[in-house]
Amino acid sequence: MRQHILVTGANRGIGLEFCRQLSEQGNEVTAVVRKPSAALEALDVEIISGVDVSNAQQVTQLASQLSGKAIDILINNAGIFESETLANMDFDAIEKQLQVNALAPLRVVHALLPNLKENSKIAMITSRMGSIADNSSGGYIGYRMSKAALNAASVSLAHELKGKGIAVGLFHPGFVQTQMVNFAGDISPEVAAERLCKRIDSLTLENTGGFWHSNGETLPW
């Protein structure tokens, strides 16, 4: 069944692969970016550019552009990554990660709520680094904080939206070879997106609010 799927942070990496694979499956895909890449422009997708999801005015403009258009799946993929430790602290970077990784997805959901309907799904692309139980090394303070905050918000959304028939899933892609981590990692964006699509397909109102690795493993909080 053809669905309308919106992907944020779609110009490269996992977001670009989401757009590629979902459009090849015959879906209508809307790619939301600050500035589109040539690779994205080559795909058969609608591109809405000039949107920084951490900017309230630009998200409001995005909602205006999409007014009256139903969204079957909203994939909040946009994110940033910095590295801070007690020995190398950058509070501005921490604040920016909280804005982009935690507040922005919530802002997007809030703005696009009129576009979501019964049986719509929201996919939050988070990280197992937001798991408190899984933190055995410290470091990456801002990123961990931002993803833990996103996880907390997403579980609240899952509870509040269940009555409207909207499911919310929290998904860790894996350690993916993207520009965000200088192409370190152990799986490609193609594999990560393929796995994540399967996890999103499996998201229902019965398991809404769950936290999964793209390989299907349930992750600890």
Image (cartoon, rainbow, N blue to C red):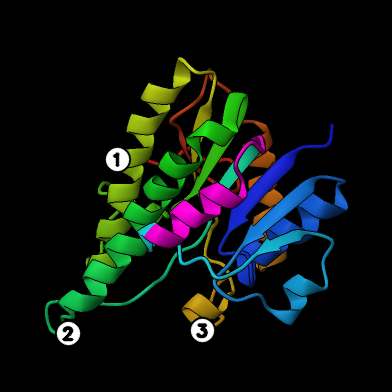
217 above or below 18? above
Closer to viewer: mark 2 or mark 1? 1
Indicate the secondary structure of the residue bearing disc 2. loop
Q: Gap in Å between the C-alphas at discs 2 and 1? A: 27 Å
Q: Give the amino acid type for the residue marked by disc 1 in the picture.
A: Ala
The residue lying toward the viewer, choosing from 160 and 144, is 160
Boundaries of the magenta span: 57-71
> In this rendering, does residue 139 appear at all?
no
Task: Name which quarter of the figure residue 186 lies in.
Answer: bottom right
Q: Tell us which disc is closer to us: 3 or 1.
A: 1
User: In this figure, which residue is indicated by the disc labeled 2?
Assistant: 88
Of marks 3 and 1, which one's residue comes earlier in the chain? 1
Q: At which x and y percent is residue 201?
A: 68, 34
Residue named by callout 3: 182
Q: Which residue is mark 1?
A: 152
Measured from the top left, where is residue 182 in percent x and y? Answer: 51, 84
Give me the residue at 58% from left, 67% from top. Answer: 33
Q: What type is the residue that disc 3 sits on?
A: Asn
- Residue 169 part of the magenta-drawn span: no
Task: Please tell me whether mark 1 sits on a helix, a strand or a loop.
Answer: helix
Q: Residue furthest top?
A: 163
| C-alpha separation, residue under disc 3 versus residue under disc 2 | 19 Å
Q: Is residue 70 magenta?
A: yes
Tell me the quarter of the image containing the N terminus: top right
